[in-house]
């Protein structure tokens, strides 16, 4: 009888202690987890005029909070791709000499369609749509890419 | 006069705190003298560099201002306007690197002497945790000037955490303070670097030193087998301690020489909307891991290359932490023991990957 009672008290104390620890740890972990900041839903941005981009060059533009690389190929065509390397989050750059997209961090290479062609990147870069309206370049989320 | 004062002060303290056993302990503490004794100094030098880090770190805190618009500017201010600011910052950076180098040397000397064996398992384990914490110090401190190299190194470093199974994604967000490396990341790294890590480090280094004090220095088997009269020792106090201090003075001179003649530079301010420049590389002590990840292909079997790499390093780190428990007895007569082989392979791997990282 005495043992049973002791076991019961031990259980009660143990559970109480666990609950107490949880009530301390849970708020701390929640505190460390940053609150979600609502992101303005950007669907399209203006990137300047076509004249700003000489052929065989590129610029990183802000698409909301995401960097996007806007490339003007040698034959004057515009391409826009997510500029965040799918490997480890570095920002890629356009190489005029090789006509490829290059990530300097780990030597990842993509072609001008954003396909990962060599190095460590596991996935292609997401494509954005580029339209030129009244000589102004509009970069927007293309339909097939979320 | 001085002697008179100390003659009065000590008994006064002793009466209240019973210091005599402690004094006796210090008086009788002996350090074994043998061919491997030189390695005893490595831990002491690492401790000295830690003290330098704390001292210069506190000084830098007087001027450093975390924040996207102030971090870089305040470090530039320290380096250009504050009297001797360039020196303090340069010492802090150089000392950080020497600190980690010394911990590596200290660790491998322990490993090759198999000093981690019973009863020193916890000394080894706490020591390895201290190395990981020191690397955490390096990683978090690297971002604080908010320059371009540090920004991308942090992006890469925190993104690697993503590859940790199950909790990777959540851990990355907690580390970064959001999805991306931003001012929130800088605030967090600042908190890690000046508050959280120092607190944990101080607790563990205290335990590490306490273990060494309780158990005494490890001596090689050849020394232990000697008859007591042939065991050469020197008193810790003052003989060994003075030797320690002398070496600390030498290290301080080397440190000052490096800090003055090769001042630590401040790069270009970080821009979250600029391409990563060529030559992005982490600090040298992360280089072997960085290079290994760089050499992995995008996919290995059904896993992403980086997941495989991260799992590999996690397994190695856990195995290394528990070395005292799977250590194999030395086989008599064999020239090269299996544990020594493992150590040599580890060093060759680290060296080759590091060199490749700088050459490729």
Image (cartoon, coloured by chain):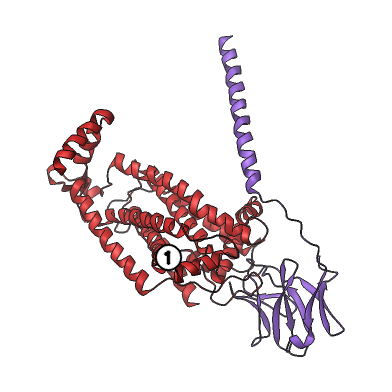
Chain colours: A purple, B red
**Residue B333 drawn above or below residue B298:** above
Choose top left, top right, bottom left or bottom right for residue B264: bottom left
Residue at 68% x, 85% y is: A99
Whether residue B338 is visible here, answered yes or no, is: no
Q: Would residue A63 appear left or right of B217 to someone viewing this image?
A: right
Depth order, front residue of B268/A80: B268
Choose top left, top right, bottom left or bottom right for residue A117: bottom right
Residue situated furthest right in the rendering: A134
- What residue did someone put label 1 on? B89
Q: Would residue B350 appear left or right of B120 to someone viewing this image?
A: right
Residue at 59% x, 70% y is: B270
Residue B36: x and y in percent read 24, 55
Q: Would residue B262 appear left or right of B161 to someone viewing this image?
A: left
User: Which chain does tag 1 point to?
Assistant: B
Residue at 59% x, 28% y is: A17
Residue at 67% x, 56% y is: B178
């Amino acid at each position: 009888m005495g043992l049973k009672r002791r076991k019961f008290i031990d259980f009660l104390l143990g559970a109480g202690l666990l609950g107490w620890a949880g009530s301390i740890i849970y708020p701390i972990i929640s505190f460390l987890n940053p609150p979600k900041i609502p992101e303005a839903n950007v669907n399209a941005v203006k990137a300047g005029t076509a004249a700003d981009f000489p052929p065989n060059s590129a610029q990183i533009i802000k698409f909301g909070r995401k960097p996007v690389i806007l490339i003007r190929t040698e034959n004057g065509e515009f391409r826009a791709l997510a500029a965040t390397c799918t490997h480890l989050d570095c920002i890629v750059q356009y190489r005029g000499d090789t006509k490829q997209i290059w990530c300097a961090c780990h030597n990842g290479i993509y072609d001008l369609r954003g396909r990962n062609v060599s190095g460590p990147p596991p996935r292609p870069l997401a494509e954005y749509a580029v339209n030129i309206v009244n000589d102004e370049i509009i970069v927007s989320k293309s339909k097939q890419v979320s | 006069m001085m002697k008179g004062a100390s003659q009065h002060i000590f008994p006064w303290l002793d009466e209240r705190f019973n210091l005599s056993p402690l004094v006796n302990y210090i008086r009788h503490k002996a350090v074994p003298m043998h061919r491997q004794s030189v390695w005893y100094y490595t831990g002491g030098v690492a401790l000295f560099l830690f003290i330098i880090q704390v001292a210069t770190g506190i000084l830098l805190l007087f001027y450093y201002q975390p924040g996207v618009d102030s971090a870089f500017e305040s470090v530039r201010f320290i380096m250009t306007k504050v009297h001797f600011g360039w020196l303090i910052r340069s010492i802090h950076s150089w000392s950080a690197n020497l600190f980690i180098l010394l911990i590596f040397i200290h660790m491998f000397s322990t490993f090759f002497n198999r000093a981690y064996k019973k009863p020193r398992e916890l000394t080894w384990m706490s020591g390895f945790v201290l190395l990981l914490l020191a690397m955490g110090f390096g990683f978090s401190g690297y971002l604080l000037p908010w320059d371009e190299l540090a920004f991308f190194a942090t992006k890469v470093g925190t993104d690697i955490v993503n590859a940790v199974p199950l909790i990777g994604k959540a851990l990355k967000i907690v580390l970064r303070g959001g999805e991306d490396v931003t001012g929130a990341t800088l605030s967090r790294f600042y908190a890690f670097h000046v508050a959280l890590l120092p607190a944990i480090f101080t607790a563990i280094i205290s335990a590490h030193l306490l273990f060494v004090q309780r158990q005494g220095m490890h001596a090689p088997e050849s020394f232990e087998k000697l008859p007591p009269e042939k065991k050469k020792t020197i008193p810790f106090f003052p003989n060994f301690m003075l030797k320690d201090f002398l070496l600390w003075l030498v290290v301080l001179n080397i440190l000052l020489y490096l800090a003055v003649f090769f001042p630590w530079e401040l790069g270009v301010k970080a821009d979250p909307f600029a391409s990563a420049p060529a030559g992005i590389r982490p600090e040298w002590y992360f280089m072997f891991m960085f290079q290994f990840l760089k050499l992995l292909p995008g996919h290995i079997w059904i896993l992403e290359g980086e997941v495989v790499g991260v799992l590999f390093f996690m397994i190695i780190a856990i195995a290394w932490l528990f070395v005292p428990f799977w250590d194999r007895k030395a086989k008599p007569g064999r020239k090269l023991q299996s544990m020594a082989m493992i150590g040599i392979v580890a060093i060759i791997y680290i060296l080759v990957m590091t060199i490749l990282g700088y050459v490729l």
